[in-house]
Image (spheres, rainbow, N blue to C red):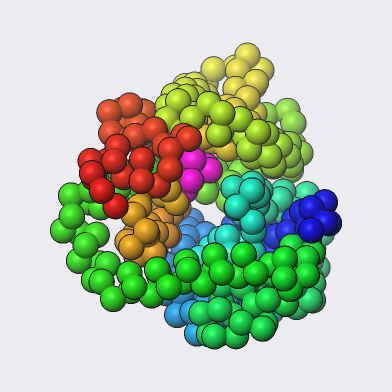
Amino acid sequence: MHRSRATFREFLVAGVATISAITMGVALGWPSPMFKKLTEYSLSDNPIGKVIVESEQSWINSVLAIGGFFGPFAAGFLADRRGRKLTLLLSTLVHVAGWVTLLQANTVEIMIAARFVLGFGSGCILVTLPMYVGEIASDQYRGILGSFLQIGQTIGILYVYCIGPYVGYYAFQWICCAVPILFMVLFGLMPETPHYYVSKGLYQRATISLMYLRDASADEVQPDLQAVKQFLQHEEQTKNTNALKKLFTEAVNLKALMISFTLISLQQWTGIDCILSNSELIFDEANISLSADVSTIIMGVIQVVCCCVTLLFVDRVGRKPVLMSSALGLTVALILLGAYFMMQQMGVESHNISWIPLTGMLGFIAIYNFGFGPVPWAIAGEIFAHDVKSIGNTINVSVSWILDFMALRFFLLISESFGFEWAFWIFAIICALAFLFTLFFVIETKGLSLQEIQERLGRRKL
């Protein structure tokens, strides 16, 4: 087997698949430059023809998460019946439909409907992409390839930050639409996963898929093919058990759900998506010397860099120390941001404190991507027993979208009614609670096998 070429093939396929994650990031970051256009009184680049009010802005921003809640259910159904590849292609086709709808949007209602469609497509991708990458990757590279989703999202957000402020409304929608179109063109050339083919009894196609991914002959991929068959046989056996009942009636499974569910809930309520999708408005309100556009781009670059650097050491340091350090850092950054806006309200000279907003925002983004961005999902992928993993993670993904919706709605309503300082301080309290929860309840999973993790949770035997 040509190991270097096989490695290249795996990274190539995973990299092309990750363009779908970039599509998600584009949808998430879209409000940041667009809200500035939609709230300018000149109406020079506003397809609606009127300045949107705070409630409309809140719905346009948060409805993405409502669509995202429904996406995982549709994607899970389709991926099992028609394949992971087709599901990803259709998910990005949904994104194309969303961007085309935004091109036609001349009312707030149409814009909200388009954002719902984009959220639905994003929810489909969030479930299907990890499934696809996990099934095409060899054991040696599954961890790093699985982290491509987080990196792809940050690249998509940076893409929006760098282009959105400098082009017109209609040109920007076409530029956003180009990402899912590019994905569909390139991903159409990539293979379906061997796991899907084997699940349908298509062993010849599974062999061809493995031959391409491993750059090996049919004889050389037979051990991999047998491993896939054994894995799916075990999956079929566990399907005969009532996974939902076992999740909620067995103490160990409940403990795993409690830990993963709470971490992901706390992650959504750090305020990350509120800051990413409203960064230009926050910087404008902060009234700093550096332009909001440039400040936002710097923040996007920091996010991508930190997300990539985190991959180098999170497996060495351990999940729990990283989470605790991240929670403390986020608390400090949010308190700092809240203090700045309070001092601004009190009339403190802005030149004396002008360093705080950019420092606080960049610090928040860096610290989030250091820990509370990737690690809760990593723990969720490790902590469940095999027979309840699917239903447990479906619950976590769906609930994460609901909580994201609530956080996005809450942020704009609180900031408009009471000021940005109160929104930041409430998020700071939640991050402090995240530190305490991690300290007392989260188990360390670094270097442990699945059976060892289950034993640490309290189960004697898998």
Vertical position of residue 107 compared to residue 405: above or below: below
**Residue 117 image position (x, y, % from top left):** 55, 75
Can residue 355 be seen here? The reply is yes
Can residue 183 be seen here? The reply is no
**252 and 66: which is toward the camera:** 252
Vertical position of residue 392 compared to residue 200: above or below: above
Residue at left 48%, top 46%?
Answer: 378
**380 and 212: which is toward the camera:** 212
Residue at left 46%, top 34%?
Answer: 446
Query: Residue pushed farthest front?
Result: 219
Residue at left 52%, top 42%?
Answer: 373
Q: Quadrant of residue 405?
A: bottom left
Q: Is residue 274 left or right of residue 48?
A: left
**Residue 93 image position (x, y, % from top left):** 66, 79
Q: Quadrant of residue 294?
A: top right
**Residue 264 image position (x, y, % from top left):** 40, 47
**Residue 106 image position (x, y, % from top left):** 63, 77
